[in-house]
Amino acid sequence: MNKYYGFVGFARNVETKPDVYEQVVEERAYYGDVFKINRKLVTSEHLNDNIIASTRISIVADPFAYNHFHEIVYLSWMGANWKVTDVQVEYPRLIMEIGGVYNGQTGPKREAP
């Protein structure tokens, strides 16, 4: 079993002005394990094929992760940010399945883990 250390991105809706909400992404670092590593190329109409990683990563969760697991949008792994497609809560861990590469908004710039 491979070990994991990386950042998990939580997208939260924050009220910036009265009745005005913005999505703010916050990154937090976590340790865990990589259970399954799978890669699949999907042919598309675009110039390049898409890479899908159906990989399961389990992190040791803190209270913030438990209270905001529904806001997880991506995690960093192998030098890229990946969409989190499924989160399973199994105390004391969160087990996440990742899909394609995440290209959305990320948290503030940080050093690589």
Image (tube, rainbow, N blue to C red):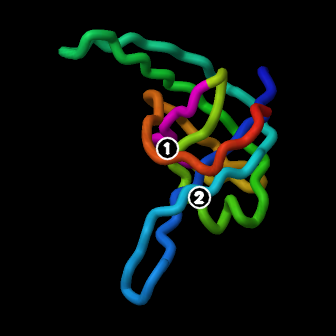
**Dot 2 surroundings within 10 Å: few (below 14), some, or many (20 or more)?**
some
Picture disc at residue 69: 2
Residue 60 % position (x, y):
78, 47
Residue 87 position within the rendered picture, expressed as x and y whole percent measured from the top left: 55, 48
- Residue at 81% x, 40% y is 31
- Compare residues 30 and 46 and report the one nearer the observer: 46
Residue range (magenta): 80-87
Which residue is outermost to the left? 45
Q: Residue, x 55% and y 52% (percent of image)? A: 72
Distance of label 2 from label 1 (alpha carbons): 10 Å
Please tell me whether the stretch drawn in magenta is mainly helix, strand or loop. strand
Q: Residue at x 54, y 46 (%)?
A: 106
Give, as a three-letter code, the residue at label 1. Answer: Asp
Q: Position of residue 99 (x, y in %)?
A: 46, 30
Q: Is residue 4 above or below residue 73?
A: above
Q: Which residue is under mark 1?
A: 86
Q: Nearer the viewer, residue 61 or 46?
A: 46
x and y, in percent, of residue 45 in the image: 18, 15
Quadrant location of the N terminus in the rendered image = top right
Residue 18: within the magenta? no
Locate residue 106 relative to residue 66 in the image: left or right: left
Q: Where 68 falls versus 18 (above or below)?
A: above
Q: Is residue 42 above or below residue 16?
A: above
Amino acid type for the residue under numbered disc 2: Phe
